[in-house]
Amino acid sequence: MKTILKNISWRSWRVWQRNFDVYKATWKVNFIPPLLEPLLYLLAFGFGFGNLIQNVTYEGQAVTYLKFLAPGLVASAIMNHGFFETTYASFVRMYFQKTYDAILSTPLMLEDVILGEIIWGATKALLAGSFMLVIACLWGLISWTAALMMLPIAFLAGMAFSGMGMCFTAVVKNIEMFNFPVFLLITPMFLFSSVFFPIESLPRWTQYVAQAMPLTFLVSVLRALVMGHFYQPHIIQIVGLLAIAVICTFLSIFLMKKKLLK
Amino acid sequence: MGIMKNSEENIIHAKGLSKAFGDVQAVDQIDFTVKKQSCFGFLGPNGAGKTTTIRMISCFLEPSDGVLEVLGKNVKESPRYIKERIGICPQEDNLDPDLTVENNLRVFARYFDIVGKEANLRSEELLHFMGLFSKRKATIEELSGGMKRRLIIARSLLNRPKLLVLDEPTTGLDPQSRHQIWEKLQQLKNEGTTILLTTHYMEEAARLCDQLVIMDQGKIVVEGEPKALIEQHIGSSIVEIESDQEDVEIYLKAHGLEFERNPTHFFIYGRAIMSLWPEISQKFGEKFCVLRMATLEDVFLKLTGRALRES
């Protein structure tokens, strides 16, 4: 813990810059899918599914299904892009491309590399969330002011999900093993964290599990900002995301050091 | 006074250096010193502990025991200081496949805080030096094995290292590429860079190294200058007899010659062989006998044995 703190430095920024350079070089590939994704979701749920459900009750207030759904989709984009960047993409860099090895032969320490990767994952999450937000704003589902307030939350949540991803990257033996966290963690969160329906409609015991999911925190905070119903519990949820981000960052660095520098 | 001066001229100083991975003692209590502006070689069969030693010098792995100082600093205490001032060429290609040749250099220079114009100038200079300037826009995939090696060496020179560490720099390369790399390393050495290398090619070690050690099973078996080692352990010449007959062995023993035997050949060392050569080639057939110059490879095989290594 002490050495981790000692070795973390601003040089993490160099790792972020490396990833950003690669991102810029292949921007067409990086840009278009996350931009299309929200459109597809909104089309499917807006015109397809949305016609079956007229209104949803939120805080005793009736809202259209699309308005209910929009912040949930922003949240799941943040989770997916943050988590996938530090799992599959980081694993490829670490294991197949030996990028970490190369960086470690410079003044950077492993702590810098891992922190830089997690911040980069959070950046990708922020970008994906922003694309979704722009579409949702243009669609009239979210106000521009609410969207702006969501950006720092998006980055913070990105740190939390990227940090979680990096913990798995530090322990898996091969890339196929990521199927476990994806099917056991990411998919259940996507389905049960009130992205698509209020948690209250679940059986009671499932509600308790759903309430503890990090994605539930994020959806709840973003939805509160959209609806203008921001209360104290939401602050606790933000603190929760912050705690996950900090703990997972340290834990992943600790696990990585054990894996790579033994 | 003398000690002070010595420690200043020592680029690497290791004493009782050890590294264990669980129960496996990869490096076992080795001592060595690399002097400024010299080329120091690590030889040894696979699994001897060469790469582990290099990884400790490069601050990738912490020693489990002993002292290791690079550029006068302890590797455990000052890894960042050391890494900032040395160049590392790893055994496996770890160029960045997501970036072009020139961007590989620029991005790498940035890790050393070499940015902007300075990074461009330094990259260009090294691309010229390594004969890669015409390939600067190419992707890594488009490079041949020799070009990739040269690019890795160029990359390791970005920070003008005081010490260049090369782990098998020419493994798997064609003779042209190998000679080209030797030429460049020779040039760097002449310019005053201290070089540390591991290799499986004895010719490479004999050509480049001022001083070398042969490692086996985590220990240093022998240390010295290439020529002196050959002279000391083999002599100037060696005779090979292609034979599996007992009478050869009886003859060699009768003449008190030092030899080694494998299922198909006898290898005979020592100063006496020059005078006995005419007799030997007569007796066992000119076709089956060879007299040749002794090489470092003979020393290597004599000291580490001819058996294959599991690794």
Image (cartoon, coloured by chain):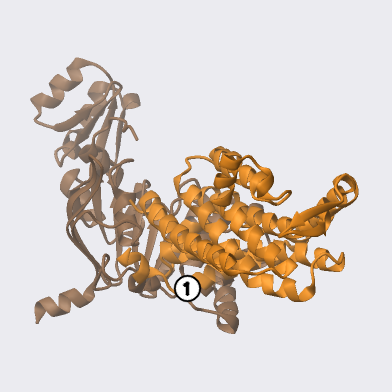
Chain colours: A orange, B brown
Label 1 marks a residue whose chain is: A
Q: Amino acid at mark 1?
A: Arg
Label 1: how many residues lie within 10 Å, few (<14), some (14-19) or many (20+)? many
Residue under the point 46% across and 49% down: A170
x, y percentage for residue A212? 54, 51
The residue singled out by tag 1 in the image is: A11
Is A99 positioned to the left or the right of A37 in the image? left
Q: Is B181 above or below relative to B237?
A: below
**Residue B197 in sight from this viewpoint:** yes
**Lateral position of residue B236 relative to residue B178, left or right:** left
| A145 relative to B186, above or below | below
Is residue B104 visible to the viewer in this orientation of the structure? no
Residue A51, percent from left and from top? 90, 47
Secondary structure of the residue carrying tag 1 is loop
* Near-viewer residue (B175 or A165): A165
Q: Is residue A61 left or right of B158 when viewed as pictured?
A: right
Percent x, y for residue B295? Answer: 29, 45
